[in-house]
Every structure is written in structure tokens, then in C-alpha cells.
Image (tube, rainbow, N blue to C red):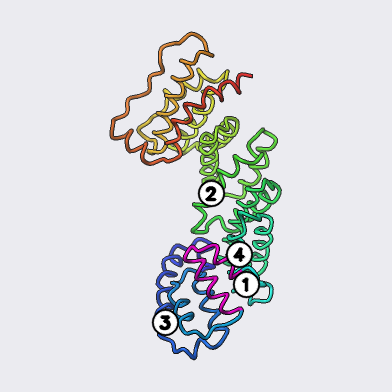
């Protein structure tokens, strides 16, 4: 069932919840003798790390019959699902995953990689590689691959990021977890060199060509939006141009792409007037709330730039199309990233100076 979730079955995702409840109800009333067998104890650990309730692990500990590796596995799994990372590290620290059965080994290695990633990202990657080899084609592999992509991003390993991203988009692009992946993926791309210039951007194009046109368009829009939030002007322009190419029959996406490009070019020396003209042409009635906030922030930026002492004498302020108070309030509440618009206004003169050097 979890393997079906990895390839995008929402029905399997819903059914999994009912199955986990059913298994939990089966485990809890079992006699103590059942839990004297190591394979049953390990099955309970695998169950909990796969999303089951931790109550069965508490019951196993209450029996007082566990010892050695099995006790550490149970205590470590319980600590992890309860958010007690220090305890989980202590219990799992000396567990050799290579001697465990594949299904349990994959789950424990996945947990150990998460516990290790802050202090030893390279060690975390080794564990995630192990997971992928242990359980190919499963939801556990999907999770390991997804996580490893972002660890590679964290340490700046663009080659590994490139290779793993292509693999994920080729094999798991329909996973029920791919939506969250794509948002984080877009943000990670702007931190690596893929969006720094046309030559590097071609590598990104190759990666995203693994997707169908609609998926590529949405990811280019996400990259453009993430680039704006991070002050990556060139990345925002390149990505919004690609999104616009793929939006011929999608008016909303085309409008979003033009908005992102305009919001980026207004901080460039030669693009300010063009960017403002494009902002004025935007039909705000078809924008989602998140982008309405960006549009309003872009007009505020434009006015800030016009009033900057580093620019020419102050022209008339840029007039933004009027939004209702309800629209503006809703937009501001719905996008935490652009709640940073206040900071962006404070940084825009720095961006402007950088672009005019």
C-alpha cells in the first residue's frame, strides 16, 4: 500500500490510515507471550516508524521482558516519534543497521539519518544511500531520496543534487508527497548555482524536462517566486521567462509569470520602467491571494526606488490598481514569505545598487 502511495495513489494514502488503525487494534490485545519473539517486537517497531500509534511500544516496555538490541530499538523508536531526539540518538547510536532485516534496517537508517543531519550531513547522506539500496521502489526509498536531495543542497553538492533530483522527478513525481517536495526543491535551486547564469540554468532545464509541461511550468513559477523572496533577480527572470513559454494556454500562469518577472526587473538599472509598465498591466482579479500580496509589495518597492536619493529626481509615485481592504488583508495573511516584504523594502536599495554597478 505504501508503495502505491509513492507512485501517487491518493486512495492508498486514505486506506493506509484505516489499515494502521486496524493493525493497532490487533496488536494491543495480544498476549504477552507473542512479544517474546524477536520478529514480533521488530514488526511493532517497523509499524510505529511507518506511521502507527506508539501505544504498542509503551505496552512492550511495560511488560519488562525486553533486553539488548530489542529494548534499544523499542526505546529509540518511541523516543523518536515522541520528539525526544537526544534519547533517540542515545538508543540508536550503536545500532548496526547492516545486520537488521531490510524493512527494519531501512526504517532505522532513515531515522538515524534525520537525527544526524545537523551535525554530520555527510554521514546522513551515507545512511540515506543505504536506505535506497535496501528498499528500492518503496515509500521508504521515496522518503530517503526526497530527504537526500535537500541534504545535498544543504552541503552545496550540486552534482549529487542534480543526479538525485532527476531520479526523483523521473520515478516519484506523482507521489502524494511531491507537492511539498516541489516547493522545497524550488527554494533549494535558488541557493545552488543552477540559477546564476544562462549556462548553469541550462542544467536546471535538463532536470525539469523529466516532467510533463504542466509540471515544468509550475516548478518554474515556484523557482521564480522563491528567487524573488531570496533576492535572486537573475534567477527570477530566467525562471519566469521559461514559465511564460509554457503558459500559452493558461492565462493565470502567464499572468503570474509576468508578475514575477516584473517584480524582479524593477530592481535592475535598465528594467525599472519596463517592470513598472508590466506591473500596471497585471490583471489583479485573476491572481491568487499570495500573488496579490506580491503585486502590492512590488508597487511599494517601485515607489521606494523612485524616492531613493540614488535615483533621478523623484517622478510621480507609481499608482497601483486599487485593492479592497478585504483583499489586501487576506493576501497579507496568506503568504508568510511576503510578510517579509517589509524587509524587502529595506533591502531594495542594496539590491538596486548591486544591479547598477
Q: Where is residue 111 in the image (x, y as percent from the top left)?
A: 58, 65
**In magenta stretch: residue 74:** yes
Q: Mark 2 = which residue? A: 182
Position of 229 relative to 35 (above/below): above
The residues tagged by marks 4 and 3 sit, at their Cα atoms, a distance apart of: 27 Å
Task: Give the side of residue 247 with respect to residue 329, left or right.
Answer: right
Position of 264 relative to 168 (above/below): above
For this orientation, the residue located farthest to the top is 313
Q: Which label's residue is closer to the chain start, 1 or 3?
A: 3
Residues at marks 2 and 1 touching, judged by CB atoms closer than 8 Å: no
Q: What element carries label 1?
A: helix
Q: Which label's residue is closer to the chain start, 2 or 1?
A: 1
Q: Mark 3 = which residue? A: 28
Q: Nearer the viewer, mark 2 or mark 4?
A: 4
Q: Is mark 4 on a helix, strand or loop?
A: helix
The quadrant in which residue 93 appears is: bottom right
Dot 2: within a 10 Å radius of its alpha carbon, few (fewer than 14), some, or many (20 or more) residues? some
The span shown in magenta is 69-92
Q: Which label's residue is closer to the chain start, 2 or 4?
A: 4
Picture residue at 51% right of the left edge, 86% below the top: 35
Q: Which label's residue is closer to the chain start, 3 or 2?
A: 3
Residue closest to the eye, 104 or 56: 56
Q: Main secondary structure of the magenta part?
A: helix
Q: Where is residue 210 in the image (x, y as percent from the top left)?
A: 62, 50
Task: Give the side of residue 191 with respect to residue 306, left or right.
Answer: right
Residue closest to the eye, 221 or 316: 316
The quadrant in which residue 118 appears is: bottom right
Q: Mark 4 = which residue? A: 112
The residues tagged by marks 1 and 4 sit, at their Cα atoms, a distance apart of: 10 Å
Amino acid at each position: 500500500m505504501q508503495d502505491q502511495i509513492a507512485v501517487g495513489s491518493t486512495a492508498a494514502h486514505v486506506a493506509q490510515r484505516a489499515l494502521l488503525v486496524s493493525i493497532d487494534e490487533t496488536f494491543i490485545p495480544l498476549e504477552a507471550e507473542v512479544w517474546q519473539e524477536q520478529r514480533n517486537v521488530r514488526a511493532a517497531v517497523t509499524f510505529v516508524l511507518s506511521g502507527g500509534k506508539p501505544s504498542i511500544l509503551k505496552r512492550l516496555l511495560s511488560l519488562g521482558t525486553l533486553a539488548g538490541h530489542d529494548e534499544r530499538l523499542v526505546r529509540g523508536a518511541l523516543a523518536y516519534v515522541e520528539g525526544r531526539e537526544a534519547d533517540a540518538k542515545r538508543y540508536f547510536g550503536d545500532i548496526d543497521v547492516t545486520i537488521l532485516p531490510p524493512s527494519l534496517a531501512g526504517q532505522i537508517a532513515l531515522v538515524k539519518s534525520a537525527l544526524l543531519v545537523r551535525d554530520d550531513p555527510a554521514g546522513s547522506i551515507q545512511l540515506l544511500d543505504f536506505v535506497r539500496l535496501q528498499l528500492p521502489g518503496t515509500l521508504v526509498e521515496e522518503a530517503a531520496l526526497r530527504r537526500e536531495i535537500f541534504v545535498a543542497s544543504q552541503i552545496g553538492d550540486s552534482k549529487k543534487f542534480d543526479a538525485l533530483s532527476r531520479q526523483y522527478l523521473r520515478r516519484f513525481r506523482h507521489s502524494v508527497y511531491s507537492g511539498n517536495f516541489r516547493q522545497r526543491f524550488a527554494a533549494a535551486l535558488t541557493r545552488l548555482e543552477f540559477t546564476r547564469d544562462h549556462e548553469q540554468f541550462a542544467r536546471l532545464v535538463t532536470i525539469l524536462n523529466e516532467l510533463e509541461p504542466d509540471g515544468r511550468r509550475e516548478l518554474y513559477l515556484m523557482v521564480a517566486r522563491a528567487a524573488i523572496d531570496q533576492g535572486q533577480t537573475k534567477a527570477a527572470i530566467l525562471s519566469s521567462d521559461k514559465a511564460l513559454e509554457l503558459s500559452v494556454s493558461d492565462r493565470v500562469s502567464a499572468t503570474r509569470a509576468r508578475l514575477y518577472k516584473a517584480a524582479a526587473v524593477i530592481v535592475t538599472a535598465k528594467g525599472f520602467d519596463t517592470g513598472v509598465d508590466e506591473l500596471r498591466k497585471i490583471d489583479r482579479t485573476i491572481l491568487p491571494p499570495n500573488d496579490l500580496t506580491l503585486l502590492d509589495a512590488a508597487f511599494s518597492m517601485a515607489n521606494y526606488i523612485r524616492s531613493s536619493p540614488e535615483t533621478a529626481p523623484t517622478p510621480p509615485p507609481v499608482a497601483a490598481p486599487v485593492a479592497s481592504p478585504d483583499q489586501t488583508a487576506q493576501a497579507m495573511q496568506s503568504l508568510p514569505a511576503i510578510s517579509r516584504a517589509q524587509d524587502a523594502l529595506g533591502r531594495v536599495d542594496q539590491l538596486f545598487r548591486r544591479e547598477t554597478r
